[in-house]
């Protein structure tokens, strides 16, 4: 099946440009939800399941990898869509960038037992953000200063856990990680329709990898890595090193 890699840029001359603060908010948390909705304007079939990955770059620019060719919208400048069919082989070395919501299973413990009749299910496995989980496990709390500040230590933890997580992804999806650096890590909070909040961590990772099994790796590029793919995570962009 043919896939398409599309560059999309918001149209500054569209009548809707006055809505730019709503379509492309400055607030990063609000932008995740706004961009999620904006992407669907390019795939207007109301009955279709999401079959695309995307990521937002600065100033209203987006990259989209999709099984369907996106339809033009006057919210965007003319789309630049090209077939996506990389020719890869074992031992190819590729530079990559990836925006990922990386999680792991946290096995429930005795403290998660609840009184019968409550809404929360007891002894349930839950997925947790790898960075926040590691910081909690290592007892990293408080503010501190300089290299001992919570934010500095959080980036150290992010780099360590990102390598572990992506190496595990590589074992499954036919590649090995040769070098890796986390450029940014942040926790995003979105409002649910029921009024509650949903939070997830987002890492921007760049690095170098080697292909081990080309067909398996190609398949992974099409389906993405990690979770929160509806909100702009999971799309790995690669080019030859």
Image: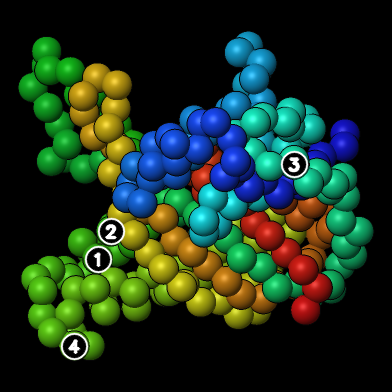
- Disc 2: which residue: 132
SS at circle 2: helix
Front tag of 1 and 3 = 3
Whether residue 66 sits left or right of residue 205 in the image: it is right
Answer with the quarter of the image where residue 110 lies: top left
Whether residue 19 sits left or right of residue 123 in the image: it is right
Gap in angstroms between the C-alphas marked 2 and 4: 20 Å
Q: Is residue 6 above or below residue 136?
A: above
Residue occupying image coordinates x 13% and y 41%: 111
Residue occupying image coordinates x 17% and y 36%: 112
Gap in angstroms between the C-alphas marked 4 and 1: 17 Å
Gap in angstroms between the C-alphas marked 1 and 3: 42 Å
Query: Mark 2 Cα within 10 Å, few/some/many (few <14, many 20+)?
Result: some
Closer-to-camera residue (23/119): 23
SS at circle 3: loop
Gap in angstroms between the C-alphas marked 3 and 2: 38 Å
Query: Mark 3 Cα within 10 Å, few/some/many (few <14, many 20+)?
Result: some
Answer with the quarter of the image where residue 86 lies: bottom right
- Disc 3: which residue: 79
- Disc 4: which residue: 146
- Disc 1: which residue: 135
């Amino acid at each position: 099946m043919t896939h398409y890699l599309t560059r999309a840029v918001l149209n500054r001359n569209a009548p809707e440009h006055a809505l730019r603060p709503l379509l492309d908010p400055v607030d990063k948390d609000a932008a995740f939800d706004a961009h999620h909705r904006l992407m669907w304007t390019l795939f207007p079939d109301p009955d279709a399941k999401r079959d695309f990955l995307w990521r937002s770059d600065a100033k209203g620019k987006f990259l989209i990898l999709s099984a369907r060719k996106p339809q033009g919208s006057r919210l965007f400048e003319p789309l630049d869509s090209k077939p996506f069919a990389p020719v890869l082989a074992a031992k190819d070395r590729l530079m990559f960038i990836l925006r990922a919501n990386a999680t792991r299973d946290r096995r429930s413990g005795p403290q998660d037992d609840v009184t019968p009749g409550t809404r929360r299910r007891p002894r349930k496995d839950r997925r947790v953000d790898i960075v926040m989980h590691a910081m909690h496990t290592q007892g990293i709390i408080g503010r501190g200063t300089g290299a001992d500040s919570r934010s500095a230590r959080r980036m150290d933890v992010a780099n360590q856990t990102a390598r572990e997580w992506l190496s595990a992804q590589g074992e499954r999806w036919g590649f090995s990680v040769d070098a890796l650096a986390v450029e940014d890590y942040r926790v995003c909070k979105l409002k649910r329709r029921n009024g509650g909040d949903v939070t997830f961590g987002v890492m921007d990772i760049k690095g170098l990898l080697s292909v081990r099994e080309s067909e398996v790796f190609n398949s992974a590029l099409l389906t993405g890595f990690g979770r929160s793919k509806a909100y702009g995570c999971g799309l790995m962009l690669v080019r030859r090193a």
